[in-house]
Amino acid sequence: MTDPEPLPPDPLPPESGGQEALAVAALLGRHGPIARRLPDFEVRPQQLALAQAIERALETRHHLLAEAGTGTGKSFAYLLPAAVYADRHQGEGPVVVSTRTIALQEQLEQKDLPFLHAVLPFEWSSVTAIGRNNYVCLRRLHAAQRDAGLFADPDQQAQLAQLAKWSLHTKDGTRQDLPFQVQPEVWEEVQAEHGNCLQRACPHFDHCHWQRARRRMQSAQVLVVNHALYCADLALRMAGAAYLPPHRVVVFDEAHHLERVATESLGLRLGPRTIGWHLRRLHHRRSEKSLLARQCGPVARLLWEEAHQHADAFFAELDHRLQQGGRGEGLALHDQQLEESVSPSLRALAREVAECAARTTEVDVRMELAARANGLEALCATLRALCVPNPEAPVAMVRWLEPSRHGALLCGAPLDVSQALRQHLFSNGPTCILTSATLGTSDDAEFTWLKQKLGIDRAKALRQGSPFDYDRSVRLVLEEGLPDPSAAASAFLREAGERTLAHVLENGGRALVLCTSWDFVRNLAAQLRPPLSERGIELLVQGEAPLARLLERKRSEPTSVLLGTDSLWEGIDVRGDALTLLVLTKLPFQSPGHPLVQARLAALRAQGRDPFAEHSLPEAILKFRQGFGRLIRSQQDRGTVVILDPRVRTKGYGRRFLASLPFTGSPEGGGADPFGP
């Protein structure tokens, strides 16, 4: 690791005219309010450089892509300029801070923001926004209480009574504030919903938790959201609506996930459970006290039954097609049109329910029926978009069938989200700050790959390394002699299990083992569990318990070994002696079997481009860097990283994986050059 740059001088005092230019430097300086409040605070040049770059980007209104290594302190580096900017530009809407994970959102809300509110020398406000369906609707709750026949199940009746009692003293009226686990069927009857709100005509308007949250969102100076909510709002804005208040600045932390989240938000998914949910909210075969049974006539009952039968038959046919021609990751539909009779029956039912609503004099009942009718119409639009290809669409929709525990899912996603993001976010939207520990490969200083993925035409780039000395804290081991996992998968699995076991036993446990597929996790767990158990080392396997519980167990039982895939490659933080060995079993290439991945690779080939070099490799390198970053989480951490995949040596692209690591020493097992002469 190179020596850090010398610290800049402390900023000039206010009377000298230096406060405006160096506000963030003053706050993060050795004599600033944060240093005075934190006894162990140390000025980090990387953090200060990042904060000042963000401050300049906000004031000059240009996009910034900023990569900052583990330990930089990114949260303070963007929250401070966000708060300063919001204070200077009151009336322009909030500065929106968007994170990918709930864990980071909770860290900001419960730890970082309260601290900054306490120490910064000016008053400012911050609010965390969540989706509308997380709030209780008092009107719907009271209506559900009045409807004695709504739930036949005594447990559900009891939960409704508990909800009513809870609603009298809850602070924010959100599902997360509930002291018990509510059944989905019960919550669905009382949740706040778009299109099912009387606004000011509601007798509960003044006490409505959702309306209060909305007013707080509108007045907040810093608004914390997650990527899914932000991208959902972006989709609404593209359709002429909005959820979040207008804003001129947005900071995306964990920004390397933005393309994937945008793809999900702009895509469509429909399965038998979704249609069943909409139909169940109207009526249930075992209930004569449903909304439809009480408010509509026999025609509606017949249409409901017809829609149910058509939906069951349609998804049974999709299941058959998937079993006949699909693989584990799905079946591409290409230009095929799916014939279906579901939408005509749903549309007829929607019209009948809407007519029932028009005839009803009770405001609550009319609103509920109208909302159900609108939901059915939206289902019809989704079905058509997924069943009928649209060659005239400005961006092609990739459609496929995907297996799930509950049957076939009908899925669709834009082939490319860069055009939508360019038009509605990066060209005609707010100033955007994108930051992460990994935004690009080591030879992509301007983050050109990510810019192309996201549709960013003009932005400044900043790369700040980690303050950690990896040469001193990390021992890097490249294992030799393993079979190629792409050519001899079974042999590689056996050998990988033996090598992993040897390293884990030598280390006394205290390990994280990262895999690239669930099958590999299950097979490796079967190999490791008996010998580890004999030596008193507990094996924690992702999927066998909630991740939060596994991490809690890992920290409380330091010698344990955590084994998993995908989400464990990033976002988890295990410090100290509980994690001193990291085993990377395979290079984390995305599976090329998924229909959306196949379509995107085919599109690159059609343009005469190299899909491996321009898609698969950069994506894998970013995930590889994230995985490496799980080991060293503080200045005191020490440990070993073992790479089992022989392709890091035998393939030309392996050099790019190793070059992406913040490690300048020679790895063990391969000499100074792991590729030989």
Image (cartoon, rainbow, N blue to C red):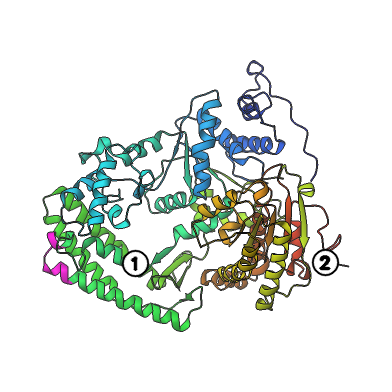
Residue 291 x/y as whole percent? 17, 59
- In the image, is residue 566 above or below residue 434? below
Query: Which residue, as the protein is rendered here, is positioned at the far right?
Result: 677
User: What residue appears at the point 49 percent right and 25 percent down from the top-left corner?
Assistant: 123
User: What residue appears at the point 68 percent right and 52 percent down from the top-left corner?
Assistant: 631
Crowd rating for badge 2 (residues with CA inside 10 Å; few <14, some 14–19, many 20+): some
Residue 146 x/y as whole percent? 16, 48
Residue 660 is drawn in which quadrant? Answer: bottom right
Q: Quadrant of the C terminus?
A: bottom right
Residue 427 is at least partly visible in this image = no
User: What residue appears at the point 67 percent right and 27 percent down from the top-left corner?
Assistant: 29
* Residue occupied by mark 1: 273
Residue 252 x/y as whole percent? 55, 46
Is 150 positioned to the left or the right of 429 in the image? left
Crowd rating for badge 1 (residues with CA inside 10 Å; few <14, some 14–19, many 20+): few
- In the image, is residue 316 above or below residue 521? below
Is disc 1 placed on a helix, strand or loop?
helix
Amino acid type for the residue under numbered disc 1: Arg
Residue 548 x/y as whole percent? 51, 52
Q: Front-most of 376 and 246?
A: 376
Is 416 positioned to the left or the right of 404 in the image? right
Residue 612 drawn in magenta:
no
User: What residue appears at the point 72 percent right and 74 percent down from the top-left corner?
Assistant: 484
Q: Front-most of 233 and 483?
A: 483
Label 1 and label 2: CA atoms lie apart by 52 Å
Magenta-highlighted residues: 293-302
Residue 120 is drawn in which quadrant? Answer: top right
Tag of residue 675: 2
Secondary structure mostly seen in magenta is: helix
Amino acid type for the residue under numbered disc 2: Phe
Is disc 2 placed on a helix, strand or loop?
loop
Query: Which residue, as the protein is rendered here, is positioned at the far bottom?
Result: 324
